[in-house]
Amino acid sequence: MDYQAIMDILSQCGLGAVLLSDLDQILRANETGIHLLHGEGGLTGKLMDEIAPQLCQESEEPLYANIAFGEYLLRCPTPQVDDLPERTHLVVFRNAACDACHDMLISIMNQINEAVALFDANGRAYLLNDAVVKMESVVTKDVLGEPVQDIYEMQDGTKLTVPEVLRTKRPLLNNRQYYTTRYGKNIDVMSSTYPITQNGQLLGAFTVMEDWHMVDELHRQIIELQGKLLEKSVGQKKNNALPAKYSFKDICYTSTCMQKAVEQCRRVAKGDSSVMIYGETGTGKELFAQSIHNASRRADGPFLAINCAAIPENLLEGLLFGTERGAYTGAERRAGLFEQANSGTLLLDELNSMNPNLQSKLLRVLQDGTFRRVGGSAEIQADVRILSNINIPPYQAIEENKLRRDLFYRLGVVNISIPPLRERKEDIPLLAKTFIIQYNKRLVKNVKDISRETLERFQNYDWPGNVRELQHAIEHAMNVLPDTMSVITPEYLPELILSESEKRPEGMPLRHSLSNVIQDMEYHTICQALRASSGITSPPRLEAFI
C-alpha cells in the first residue's frame, strides 16, 4: 500500500496527516489534516513550523498546537511507510481539544487548596488532586481503580458518603468525617459530596474536603493571639516562644515500619515520660518530637529545642539553666530554657554531643525536678517534659562514652527508633510527590511527578542523608528542570545520586558497617566463583550466604 492510500485511511479514522520535506514544507495533506489545520485555501508549499510548530517536534511529553481558539492538536505515532518520496517524512496528528481541556483542569485542580477526590459510578477512585495526596499521604497510583471501601475506613460509626451519594444521586453537604486511610493515617475533615450526572446517566461522584485539623489549628492560634493581645493590654508579659508547627499528620509514609513508629509515638504522647528518639541524620527526628508535643497535654505550653552540638560547652550550661548577674564576665540575669519551657516541652537535639560533665548536671534536674541558675543559689522548680534526639544507637553512644548510662536510663524511659529511608523505600513515591507539591508553590513550577527511570534510580540509591537528602534532590531537580518539562527525569538529579545509583549491581544490598563491607567483599568473591564454576551470570542475593 502506497503512502497516499495510507494517508486516506488515516483521514477516514479521523487522523490528520501531512507529508513534509526535510525543511518541514508541506507537500501533501489528507482531508482531515486540511480541516484540522484550517487549510481549505491550500496548504501545499507552506511551512509547518509557521502553522503548528509543536507538531514538528517529537516528544515523550504531550505538546499541544493551539491552532485556533479552543482547538488543540496533538502529534500521534507515525505508522511505518516504505514508499515515501526521498527526503520526506510523514506527520500524523489528531484533534486533542478534550485532552488539552483535561490537562488544564487537572492543573487547576492541583493548584487549589481544597482536597478533591473523584470516583466513578462504581465507587472506584478515579482522580485525587495534590491536596488529597498531601492531606492523606496516599500514593495515587496505588489507589486508582480501588473501591472507596478498600481505601478508607470510617472511625465514627458513620457511613462513607460516596457510596450513599451514588445510591441516592443526591448531594451530602457539610459532613464532619473521621476516617483512617489504608495506610493507617487518621483524617478529620469537613466534606461535601456531589453526584455527577449527564443526560440522566450517573457518571460518578466527587467529594470536596477541608482538613478540619488545620481549621482547629487556626482556631487555636486565634485564641492564643487574643490571649496575647489581652495580656498586653493589661501590661502583662507572656513567653513568646515559637510553637511546634508539626504534627503526626505531617509525617508522610505508607510503609509498615513507619506506621508502627508513628502509632508508638501517638501512644507515648499521651503520657509525660521522657522520650529518646534515635534516628540517622535526616530521618525527621524533630518532626517526631514536635508531633509528640502537639499530641500531648502540654500542647498549649511552649516547645523549645536546643542543638547540643551547635552550642559551645561554656555557653550551653547557661542557656539550659539560666544565669545570674556576675556569674561570669558579662553575665546578665536571664532565665534558661528549663524556666522558659515551664509547663511545656524541651527538646535536647544531638544529646550525644553534650559534654559528660554537663550531662551529670542535667541528671540532677531529672532526678529532683529542681535546678539552680549558673552563679545562683536559689532552687528553681522545673515542670518540663524532656525529649531528646540522638543520631547514633544509644548503646553505641554509651560504649563510646558519649552518653552517660544513668542519663540514658532517665531520658530513655521510652525509646523510639525511626527507620532510615533505605529500609522504607516504598515511601519514596509519596515523599517525592509531597516535596514536588511543596516546591511547586515555592518555585512557581508545574511539575507533576518523577519518571519511572527516576524512581528506579531512587530505589537503587542508599540515601545516607535519608529523607532530607531526598528533599534536596527534588529541590535540585526542580530548580534545573526546564519549564517545558513536567516530569523529573534522571539527567536532572544531583550528580552523586546518578553516579551512586549506577554503581550498585542489581540485587546488591547497600550497607555501611565494617562487617557489612566484609560481607560485600565475600559476596563478590562468591559470585565470581559461581560464574567460573557453573556459568551463573546473574548475581544471587547476599542474604542467601549470610
Image (cartoon, rainbow, N blue to C red):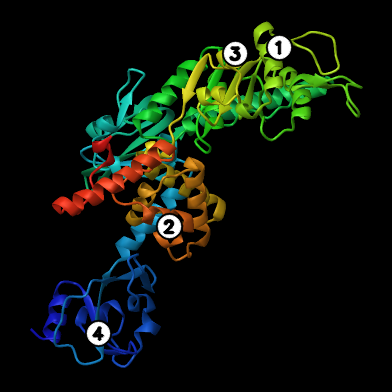
Q: Quick one: quadrant of the C terminus?
A: top left
Comparing labels 4 and 3, the label whose residue is closer to the camera? 3
Which residue in the structure is indicated by mark 4? Answer: 89
The image quadrant of residue 429 is: top left
Which numbered disc, 3 or 2, marks the residue that appears first in the sequence? 3
Distance in Å between CA atoms under marks 4 and 2 = 38 Å
Q: Do tag 4 and tag 2 residues touch (Cβ < 8 Å)? A: no
- Label 2, label 1: how many angstroms apart (C-alpha)? 51 Å
Q: Are marks 2 and 1 in contact (CB under 8 Å)?
A: no
Q: Residue at x 34, y 65 (%)?
A: 62
Q: Quadrant of the N terminus?
A: bottom left
| Residue 444 visible, this orientation | yes
Near mark 2 (Cα within 10 A), the count class, few <14, some 14-19 or many ≥20, is: few
**Residue for badge 2:** 499
Distance, label 3 to label 2, CA atoms, is 44 Å
Identify the amino acid type marked 3. Asp
Whole-Å distance between the Cαs marked 3 and 1?
Answer: 20 Å
Q: Amino acid at mark 1?
A: Ala
- For the residues marked 4 and 1, what is the alpha-carbon distance in whole angstroms? 81 Å
Circle 1 sits in a helix, a strand or a loop, which is it? loop
Apparent side of residue 62 relative to residue 248 in the rendered image (left or right): left
Residue 406: mark in rendering = 3
Give the mark, 4 or 2, whose residue is nearer the N terminus.
4
- Nearest to the eye among marks 2 and 1: give it: 2
Residue 29, given in percent of the width and then of the height, sits at 23, 85
Q: CA distance from mark 4 to mark 3?
A: 79 Å
Q: Residues within 10 Å of mark 4 (few under 14, many from 20)?
A: some
Q: Amino acid at mark 2?
A: Ser
Disc nearer the start of the sequence (4/1): 4
Q: Which mark is residue 382?
A: 1
